[in-house]
Image (tube, grey):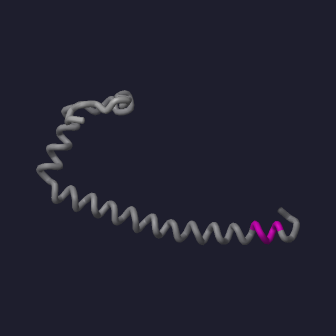
Amino acid sequence: MRLGEVHAGTDRSRVPCLTLADVYGVFHYYRMHRRAADAYLKMQDWLDKTLRGDLGAEHRKFLTSLRRRMEARWLTGNG
């Protein structure tokens, strides 16, 4: 696919506010500020992985606690 072509099956109504000029503008900005953009994206990726790891650990603790409580209720006949 060449720059400017629309992928077959793309629903243009999903992004009606974007023009082809907007898309080219983003490409141009990236080419002019590649190092800063790449550094920003790398930092965002690191933050995402860090936060997901922290939230995942908290989620596992919660699920373990919930599972124990459910098993206890089931064993006592209250579930």
Q: Is residue 3 above or below residue 52?
A: above
**Residue 79 is one of the magenta-drawn residues:** no
Could you tell me which residue is drawn at 72 percent across and 71 percent down?
A: 68
Q: Is residue 54 left or right of residue 6?
A: right
Disc tally is 0
Could you tell me which residue is drawn at 53 percent across and 71 percent down?
A: 57
Task: Name which quarter of the figure residue 42 lies in.
Answer: bottom left
Task: Name the image quarter holding the C terminus.
Answer: bottom right
Could you tell me which residue is drawn at 70 percent across and 68 percent down?
A: 67
Residue interval drawn in magenta:
70-74
Report the residue that reaches farthest toward the right.
77
Task: Name which quarter of the figure residue 27 lies in.
Answer: top left
Q: Main secondary structure of the magenta part?
A: helix
Q: Is residue 16 left or right of residue 72?
A: left
Could you tell me which residue is drawn at 36 percent across and 31 percent down?
A: 10
Report the residue that reaches farthest toward the front.
1
Q: Position of residue 49 (x, y in %)?
A: 40, 65
Task: Name the image quarter holding the N terminus.
Answer: top left
Task: Name which quarter of the figure residue 75 lies in.
Answer: bottom right
Q: Is residue 38 left or right of residue 55?
A: left
Q: Is residue 25 left or right of residue 62?
A: left
Q: Position of residue 34 (x, y in %)?
A: 16, 55
Q: Position of residue 6 (x, y in %)?
A: 28, 31
Q: Position of residue 9 (x, y in %)?
A: 38, 29
Q: Is residue 1 above or below residue 32?
A: above
Report the residue that reaches farthest toward the left.
32
**Residue 72 is one of the magenta-drawn residues:** yes
